[in-house]
Image: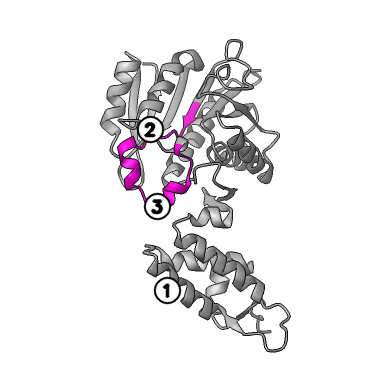
Amino acid sequence: MTEEPPQVEEPRQAGEPRETVGDLLRDGIERLRRSNSETARLDAELLLADAVGLGRTALLAHPELPVSAGAAVRYRAGIERRSTGEPVAYIRGSKEFFGLVFAVDRRVLIPRPETERLVELAEAEGRRRRAAMRPGSDRRLRIVDVGTGSGAVIVAVAASLRRLGALDDIELTGLDISDDALDLARENAVGHALAEVIAFEPADLLDRGAAPGGEGPHDRPSFDLVLANLPYVRHDALPGLPIAASFEPPLALDGGEDGLIVIERLLAQLPAALATDGLALLEIGADQGVAIVELVAQVLPGWRCAVELDLAGLPRVAAISRS
């Protein structure tokens, strides 16, 4: 039996114009090219797939399919928003990251592919540390994601550990100074059935006493693994970022004069929050490999800092621990 192509057409009124997938893609790509989009074809394909409720691959396989008037209106509205520079992730309301789909909007930074390196290192370290725990011990492995934003990092780590059957005896926490970001992070945890596994709390970096609604750090056990993707863009470089970045929260991008001002504040908090044998994994900019080593030596004399590379061979994650 021949498989029928997907149907995306709704009932039409007599005389209603009939537009196809191919027609709409052609018009959308042209509109985005006129707005100087560097990814016009991909953006148009993603927006049309979202508007009609089909996967992008299925859509491209059937350019002759008629598209309903309602879907065409939604698509054109998305194209117009994209032509102003608004990120496709905000228009669709979602972003794929580490094989998972996360809800995103203007409350949070859009997860980047390079941040997947941070998740990979965190999952491997969490798995290694859990395997080294003594059988029958009542101690729990404590992992925290600082500046969690959408929750993409901590949710991805938790989902990866769950697939490996390694979530038992692990306590996961996401911290953020923004209540709006925490609300979205909780939503993403619910969407991946991890709401009972991850606690989200307000904090100024690791200081839960400094954030509105925070409970204070003094009676809290230390963390074994600290993860953070904090703002690391130099302030004077912000105007040169792609226009899409102007739609994202400045608080999540601006790393101050040298790009490391927020990371420096976190480093100063590590002695009180990191376990004696703990490890901090901090995402950095590709041009900050040398600077982060020097900064750790300055703020945390005697501590160790190793820089992990991403798939492109560029500095991406600083692994920081006591010597």
Would residue 25 be found to the left or right of residue 304 on screen? Answer: right
* CA distance for labels 3 and 2: 18 Å
* CA distance for labels 2 and 1: 36 Å
**Magenta stretch encompasses residue 102:** no
Q: Residue at x 57, y 24 (%)?
A: 142
Where residue 238 sits: x, y (%)? 35, 42
Q: Secondary structure at mark 3?
A: helix
Q: Magenta stretch?
A: 226-250
Mark linked to residue 147: none
Residue behind mark 2: 255
Q: Secondary structure at mark 1?
A: helix
Pick whichever of labels 2 and 1 is earlier in the sequence: 1
Q: Residue at x 30, y 42 (%)?
A: 314
Residue type highlighted by circle 1: Glu
Q: Residue at x 54, y 70 (%)?
A: 57
Mark linked to residue 243: 3
Where 257 sits versus 239, above or below? above
Where 102 sits versus 262, above or below? below
The number of numbered badges drawn on the structure is 3
Where 94 sits versus 301, above or below? below
Residue behind mark 1: 30
Q: Residue at x 55, y 78 (%)?
A: 21
**Magenta stretch encompasses residue 246:** yes
